[in-house]
Amino acid sequence: MPRIFSASFRLFQITTAAAIFLFAIFACSDVAYSADSEILALKNTGRDFVRISRNVTPSVVNIRTFRRSSSRRLDPSDRFFGEMFEPFREFFGQDFGREYYGPSDEKMVQVGLGSGVIVKKEGIILTNNHVIEGAEEIRVTLSDRTEVSATVIGSDPRTDIAVLKLPEGNYPVATMGDSDNIEVGEWAVAIGNPFGLGQSVTVGIVSAKGRADVGLADLEDFIQTDAAINPGNSGGPLIDLDGKVIGINTAIFSRSGGYQGIGFAIPSNMASTIMENLLRTGRVVRSDLGLRVQEVTDAILEAFGAGVSKGVIVSEVLEGGVAKGSGIKRGDIITRVKGRIVENVDSYYRISSILPVGHEVPVVLIRDGLPSTFMVKVGELPARPRDGSVRLQTALGFSVDELTEKLAEQLGYRYERGVLITRIARMSQADKAGLHPGDLIVKINGYPTPDLETFKSIFEAIEWEENVKVSIIREGSEFTAKMVLKQ
């Protein structure tokens, strides 16, 4: 028995050793296979970036803008001049503010440097408005180092988009993509001409969508990315792995002026809408859903059983508006428009004013405590809309309300008559003009506004592109803010 047991144990040892040996071989093989697969995947991703760079880079251009110098001779070695432009050179490149002699030997001063992308073969370029704003001459350097002049087709400061035209020719183009379909976490490739050194490619991911209140433009709906957007990249394209343009790079968020991992791009769908408006009509068409909305309080949300914490409540479906007949009713609480979250009145007007006119968009709302979706065909914001608050929100960027006795007592307006500013949109004309919530408007263009009805009648008579002088009282002092009623 002992001998049989010993033989059996010996056989067990041999079998176990063989099994361990084979397991080790297969395990090492799996590890090697896994490592090879990961390296191959990385190489394939790298090849995708190479492909994108080769296909898109030829359509990316460098843009330099110039303005005529003053009668004072500007010497590049002038110490004051150099120091004055030094902070801007940190962002726009070392050529910012340098002198340039035009074709007629007239002295020019370079005031801007950026990038752009050709999106139509006849030479149509998309870039940022801030790249070309105030320029008297625009010089574009193509990927083959050819330098040509460009003209401005049109621009939209409120979204920071500009459209340029090159001389007649057949140019390499980048294909526009659908920015609505991108997802957070996808690869993103930024191409531009940082620091004026030549074309450059950086890679990252889409960090967020629908970023607003960044303070870069009036109407914001940015794609956030960690692909490095360095000085001079403004106006260049943000590309997906299909090699299509999903955004126009506009700025970085930085405390130092350099890259810190947060960059912003204007979605390609917004840029395309603005571009087509400018090419077709020479102006920007603002969209409208034909609804009057107001803020919703926690009490309203609770009373309606909405089950949400954000949104706006429909106070009126305007007669003749595009929402009439859509099924949307007074008292509905709108939470999303075309997939965008509606947080408050400001965000509603921001979203609803940059929709593609003529397209149907989904509007998600809460009614009787239950969510519903209605399709609304987007209309054009009329030159003089019936709802004056729409013009205030979208054109000037502030809201007003009646000055009640209680508010007058609380705010110290016992002896004044006017209308109260209740909200100011960030980076709007009202914000830039220095208006604050709580300011009391007492006149518009010199006409007294003792109550809300008078205010509305005066304001709604003002035409687009007219100057608007708003006289306000704040802490006992009166001053006037100047704006322009722009679409």
Image (tube, rainbow, N blue to C red):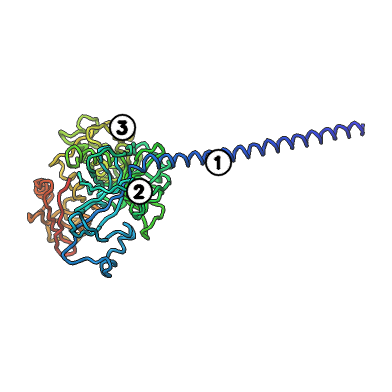
Crowding around mark 1 (Cα neighbors within 10 Å: few <14, some 14 to 19, many 20+) is few
Q: Position of residue 40 (x, y in %)?
A: 54, 39
Q: Would you name the residue on which mark 2 appears? A: 192
Crowding around mark 2 (Cα neighbors within 10 Å: few <14, some 14 to 19, many 20+) is many
Residue at the extreme bottom of the image, as rendered? 79
Left or right: 303 with respect to 411?
A: right
Q: Would you name the residue on which mark 3 appears? A: 373
Which quadrant of the view contains residue 28? top right
Left or right: 431 with respect to 145?
A: left
Mark 3, secondary structure of its residue: strand
Quadrant where the N terminus is found in the figure: top right
Among numbered discs 2 and 3, the one appearing first in the sequence? 2
Q: Would you name the residue on which mark 1 appears? A: 39
Q: Is residue 75 visible?
A: yes
Which residue appears at 15% of the width and 33% of the height? 320
Q: In the image, is residue 385 above or below residue 213? A: above
Q: In the image, is residue 270 above or below residue 234? A: above
Mark 2, secondary structure of its residue: strand
Among numbered discs 1 and 3, the one appearing first in the sequence? 1
Q: Are marks 1 and 3 in contact (CB under 8 Å)?
A: no
Disc 1 or disc 3, which is closer to the eye? 1
Left or right: 10 with respect to 459?
A: right
Quadrant where the C terminus is found in the figure: top left
Give the camera-side residue of 470 and 432. Answer: 432
Give the camera-side residue of 364 and 289. Answer: 289
Given the image, on which type of amino acid does mark 1 rest? Ile
Give the camera-side residue of 74 and 306. Answer: 74
Given the image, on which type of amino acid does mark 2 rest? Gly
Which quadrant of the view contains residue 385? top left
**Gap between marks 2 and 3 measured at Cα:** 40 Å
